[in-house]
Image (cartoon, rainbow, N blue to C red):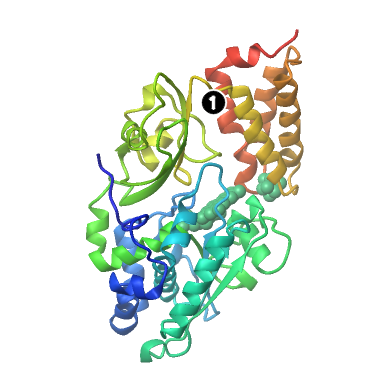
Amino acid sequence: MPVVKVLTDGIGEIDMRSIDAYRKRDGYEQWKRALLHLKPEEVMEYADKSGLRGRGGAGFPTGRKWSFLPKNGKPRYLVCNSDEAEPGTFKDRMLIENVPHLVLEGMLLGTYGIGSHHAFIYVRGEFKEGFRTFTRAVEEARAAGFIGKDVLGSGYDVEVTVHRGAGAYICGEETGLLNSLEGKRGEPRLKPPFPAVEGLYGMPTVVNNVETLAYLVPILSRGWEWFAAVGTERSKGFKVVSVSGHVQRPGNYEVPLGTPVRELLELAGGLRPGRTLKAIQPGGGSSACIFEEHLDIPYDYESLAKAGTMLGSGAMVVFDDTTDFVKAAHNLVRFYAHESCGQCTPCREGGIWLERVLERLLEHRGLRGDLDMLHRVSSTITGTNLCPLGDSIEPFLRSVLLRFPEQFEACLIS
Ligand SMILES: Cc1cc2nc3c(=O)[nH]c(=O)nc-3n(C[C@H](O)[C@H](O)[C@H](O)COP(=O)(O)O)c2cc1C
Ligand code: SF4
């Protein structure tokens, strides 16, 4: 079983929340090394050569994202995205609650690597405990001299701001997040300009996920070659996968990218006794389902895309034969309809329309033509919006509608 412990090492066994506990495990050694012995370009080189890709959903290469920052002398910012509201995803919460100093050290390395002096972390509103724990970690790191003016006598100044959101899924989208951080409505911005050029307060900004930034620490300590040697040709390194749904041991499992889906299912204890597998949503609420015939595909960006779905945030939701897929589809569509910020007509109106049709089906009052309407409306929403939230409504619905039409047809009255 390829379970590995890199970011998750010690979680659930040792309390690593205090700076003393973290430093006993060589905490902040990479931060010291970077400040005293590496140039920012060298830190960027580590990120780039490791092949690290963003773990927040889109899988964009981290080093390449950093390289887009213009060299125009303007202040730059690093923003750590800890909004984590993608259905089924609970890995970032585990990291900020259990290893806050590891995340903070990764943020500091990223901030230095992009030539910035100010990092922000946007913590999901509901993560009260994570917010408290992370704020405490920042205070401890400041008291230890790892944050502030002239850090460790290096001449480098750095500030960290911890910001708590107010519980809106759309504030996880990077430009919605930046607006919210600026005190505006959390609505996604029209792109371009991309955040790298015009981000927070109009300045060049990098937004990276919690897990992405945390991996910088082991990449620096063990070398980019170590990270790049794991995984597949284009999906390098490790991934913390949140496995939930109809499994016996739901939880976060850290594995090399490319681990077969079947092994992830087994790590989570497999299905409950006597049950059979119906579907797996492999990459968070926005991904299409895969099925029994896909169990042997490797869990990596390319293989999942080839199977018509995506790795997304790395949240695997398992559905067994007790699942009512009309209910499941209604639940997810209702979530997206509720979380739509309302700027785009197809997302705002289409989501509500789909929700109402599914509600009718749930009540066994479906009309002839409703299933066609579900297909038509959901495909009309896709590709016609400002941000990917609109496009997230269709994949799950479409995949289960095509795979289990009998469950939907059973809800029609005419
Ligand atoms: C509706 C929506 C919600 C998102 N929520 C999150 C989130 O909670 N955390 C996150 O890291 N990325 C989220 N993303 C992706 C971010 O926009 C962005 O791509 C990511 O933070 C970049 O970090 P990475 O390159 O390290 O993956 C979301 C995107 C969309 C469209
Ligand atoms: S797609 Fe939806 S959530 Fe995204 S900007 Fe448009 S209305 Fe807002």
Q: Quadrant of the N terminus?
A: top left
Give percent across and percent down for residue 322. Answer: 52, 20
Q: Is mark 1 within 8 Å of ligand 1?
A: no
Left of 151 or right of it: where is 203? Answer: right
Q: Quadrant of residue 233?
A: top left
Point 55% across, 39% down: residue: 285
Give percent across and percent down for residue 198. Answer: 60, 68
Q: Quadrant of residue 356?
A: top right
Q: Check the image and report above or below for 163 versus 337.
A: below
Mark 1 is surrounded, within 10 Å at the Cα level, by few (under 14), some (14 to 19) or many (20 or more) other residues, namely many
Instruction: Quickly name the residue at label 1.
Output: 399
Left of 302 or right of it: where is 373? Answer: right
**Residue 195 shows in the view:** no
Point 58% across, 26% down: residue: 398
Left of 410 or right of it: where is 231? Answer: left
Q: Check the image and report above or below for 53 versus 68.
A: above
Q: Nearer the viewer, residue 250 or 169?
A: 250
- In the rendered structure, which amino acid carries the disc numbered 1? Ser
